[in-house]
Amino acid sequence: MTRPAPSTEKPFLYVVVCAAGVAAGVGELITAAQERDWEVGVLATPAAMGGFFDAAAVEAQTGRPIRSDWRRPGDARPFPAPDAVVAAPATFNTVNKWAAGLADTLAVATLCEACGLGVPVAVLPCVADALAAHPAYRESLERLRGMGVRFGDPYTGEEEADGGRPDFGWDRALDLIEGS
């Protein structure tokens, strides 16, 4: 991802979506970003493209195709270079591959490149407690934080009336990016 001059007047945000149940709500993040005057392009892991969110609705909302596969030589770049990147929801697998530099998908490669280019990156993890306790995950968070990646807790809101987890706080990712 080279950094050509932006082709839009608004800053451009890449949203990387991973395969987690809350991914169905990614439209909330897109809406919040657009309300804050961002243009948005979505990249998704191959697993996330397997029905974790409504791809047609996301494409209609952003006016752009979702990127999940590599471009072929000679293909036009469908997005301008990012001004910021949000990974939400970010899974155990993606966080660990990213920290290890295992850029085997377009989504993970984009996260790796963004860090190398100094593009601000914010992450809202969606990781089960048992996986979050794994030493590899804790080491990955430490490594990524050392690279300047900002992590937020998407569940820091009010508990639901039934005592369940609060809604996924999509806009927290934007707060992390805009706080830079």
Image (cartoon, rainbow, N blue to C red):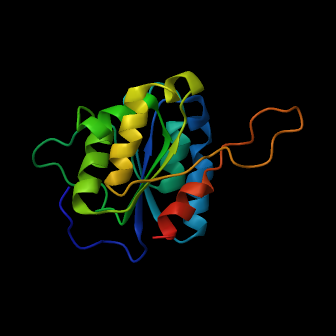
At 41% from the left and 27% from the top, the residue drawn is 135
The image shows residue 61 at horizontal and vertical percentages of: 54, 53
Q: Is residue 147 visible?
A: yes
Spot the residue most to the left. 73
36 and 111: which is toward the camera: 111
168 and 145: which is toward the camera: 145
At 80% from the left and 47% from the top, the residue drawn is 158
At 85% from the left and 33% from the top, the residue drawn is 163
* Residue 160 placement, left or right of 10: right
| Quadrant of image for the C terminus | bottom left
The image shows residue 58 at horizontal and vertical percentages of: 52, 46
157 and 20: which is toward the camera: 157
The image shows residue 147 at horizontal and vertical percentages of: 31, 54
At 44% from the left and 30% from the top, the residue drawn is 92
| Quadrant of image for the N terminus | bottom left
Spot the residue most to the top. 130
The image shows residue 120 at horizontal and vertical percentages of: 37, 62
| Label tally | 0
